[in-house]
Amino acid sequence: MGNKIQDNDSINELGKIIKTTKVLNPILKLLNIDSGIDINKITKEYADLLTLNDDFNMYYHDRGWIAHESLNIDVLKFCVSIAKDGNIDRGEEALMEYYEGELKNFEKYSYRKHFYDRHELLNLAIEDYFSGRYHASIPIALLSADGIINDVEPTGLFAKETDLEVWDSISGHGSGLKSLVSLLSKNRKKTSTDSISLPYRNGILHGRDINYYNKFVAIKSFALLIYLADWIRERSSEADRMRKKEEKETKTWGELFKSIANTTREQKENEKLLKEWKPRFFEVIPSTYESNSPEEKVFEFLECIKNKNYGTPTSMYPTFILGNSSRKSKARILRENFKDITITNYEISKINDSSAAVTMITMKIAYEYNGLLKEKNVDFRVMYEVNGEVNNRLKLNGSWKITNIEGISYILIE
């Protein structure tokens, strides 16, 4: 792995593609072939983004922040820009505001079992945070981070032997999570009443940093959990990404250029569709659904579970969850999760088109569990996929997937 994130294979690959395109574009113009590629624009965007993650880590790492895959690009750009102007404090304010927004929508991380197993405890910790009870929220966030990695690796997050580097990753780069954990694992051998601004794990959990409970330490502790969500995804997809890289290396120049042209066309189409898409607003919540809508997918899922059909819903798993697992394996998981749940009725309570690719649907579900009749409101996060990639719902030939499909049964039985 390179010393900088800009040395990552995917970033280098993009640079090679741009250089290749610069060579091929003049030749194509001579042949009156329009590639549709604005090479000057792409080159400038690449140059602007090339060092962005490394610059962010350089400015903010020692303050407890790192670049990671899901960090909003506009926030990333703003924080780097303002740090270059010498105002890192303002950048920290922006980061605190951003991660507070992520905390308010923390349920989107609950589709992962490691997070869902702890969702009740984490929700209490988040409630404590927004109530100013930092003394209670910080230890829970740190303990959860340690336990989540312990579920993935044989050792915990802060153990020296835990390997946190992931190939071709931002969060898994040596300057990312690995380096940050090393900073937060710093020995705190003396009891101190001085206020701190970093969530020193040992000092806080071993009772040495007594004056730890402030907003800075709290939000950085929760940000650590969000870094872990990206890191787990990167780690689980590492082998598949390496395989795809090997496939790319066998491409001819012609195939490479065709891939570039297709990517450019898709980007222009996506920009056009994003301008066309508008969220739906319902004065009255519908009792039925439109064809190929997110509501249809949720109704289909619940009807299958109601009828003890565990095979059909396997197609509703998003690609990034159990993507390499067989239909039989997914059906076995669903059967195990729902075998003791008998759904009797369901209806829509709320629909929110949160983005062009995602809709949040709240369903009121009546069911029987352990001989008891129950009723609960359950949130479904439904995402639109085209060829295994998240995409605008206006794009043709896609299908809706339920991103928190693994967590639905846990909500019903709790």
Image (cartoon, helix red, strand yellow):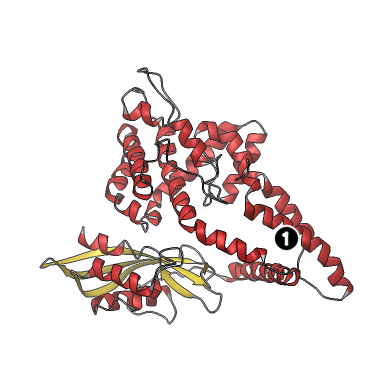
Q: Which residue is mark 1?
A: 17
Task: Give the quadrant of residue 287.
Answer: bottom left
Q: Is residue 241 above or below residue 203?
A: below
Alpha-carbon neighbours of circle 1 within 10 Å: few (<14), some, or many (≥20)? Answer: some
Q: Is residue 96 visible?
A: yes
- Under mark 1, the amino acid is Ile
Task: Give the residue at x 52% y 46%.
Answer: 171
Q: Is residue 213 visible?
A: no
> At numbered mark 1, what does the secondary structure look like: helix, strand or loop?
helix
Image coords of residue 201 (percent x, y): 38, 31
Task: Give the residue at x 37% y 26%.
Answer: 203
Task: Give the residue at x 53% y 31%.
Answer: 62
Image coords of residue 270 (percent x, y): 61, 68
Left or right, 349 with respect to 291, comes to: left
Q: Nearer the viewer, residue 197 or 131?
A: 197
Image coords of residue 253 (percent x, y): 75, 68
Task: Give the quadrant of residue 136.
Answer: top left
Residue farthest along the right direction in this orientation: 30
Q: Nearer the viewer, residue 374 or 69?
A: 69
Task: Give the residue at x 75% y 53%.
Answer: 44
